[in-house]
Amino acid sequence: MKRIIALVFLVLACQSLTAQETMASKPKAGASKTLSNVQKGKSIFLANGCMDCHSVNGQGCTEGVSLSSVGLRRDAEFLKQQLVDPDKHVEKNKKAFNSEPNLMTNPNLSPGEVSLIVDYLQTLKKPLPKKGSKSKDYNTL
């Protein structure tokens, strides 16, 4: 039921974005597409329950890895590989994951969904806390 509600939200959000893009007057070349992709990526991220394990800017589950600064820490290819096959990616990149086992389930996303989520994640660039300071928002690899 939760997934159905999330999918309905995603469809409505995408319809709203399409209507906004249609009504926009003379957007800058490429600017609206990028913003639209980021918004769509965030909607897909939320609809797939990513916040059930992850947090962004103090919102969501603080038990998993915070993604608040993932755009500073990881490049697009790293994020794509993690979303496509988390088990394989963690096994291949043990050092990046501090030799921790993979806890992320495979989200089974289409290539287009992966691309949109990566567009969104690349915008998450909250500055990292200073060394030694505590933050409930950061549990990073």
Image (cartoon, rainbow, N blue to C red):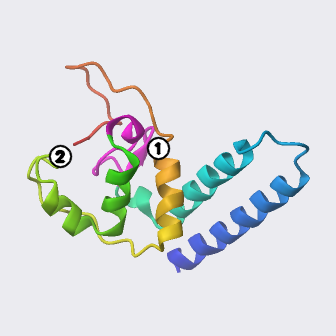
* Residue drawn at 51 percent across, 40 percent down: 123
Seen from the viewer's position, the closer of residues 120 and 55 is 120
Residue 102, quarter of the rendered image: bottom left
Residues shaded magenta: 54-73
Secondary element at image label 1:
loop
Residue 7 rendering spot, x and y as whole percentages: 59, 74
How far apart in space, not on screen, are marks 1 and 2 (Cα)? 18 Å
Circle 1 sits on which residue? 122
Do the residues under discs 1 and 2 have CB atoms within 8 angstroms? Answer: no
First in residue order: circle 1 vs circle 2: 2
Secondary element at image label 2:
loop
* Residue drawn at 46 percent across, 53 percent down: 118
Q: Is 20 positioned to the left or the right of 37 in the image?
A: right
Q: Is 15 positioned to the left or the right of 53 in the image?
A: right
Residue 66 rendering spot, x and y as whole percentages: 34, 44
* 18 over 133 or under it: above or below: below
* Residue drawn at 32 percent across, 61 percent down: 81
Q: Give the label on residue 96, or none.
A: 2
Q: Give the label on residue 81, or none.
A: none
Residue type at tag 1: Gln
Q: Main secondary structure of the magenta part?
A: loop
In the orientation shown, which residue stands out farthest toward the left?
99
* 84 over 130 or under it: above or below: below
Seen from the viewer's position, the closer of residues 24 and 29 is 29
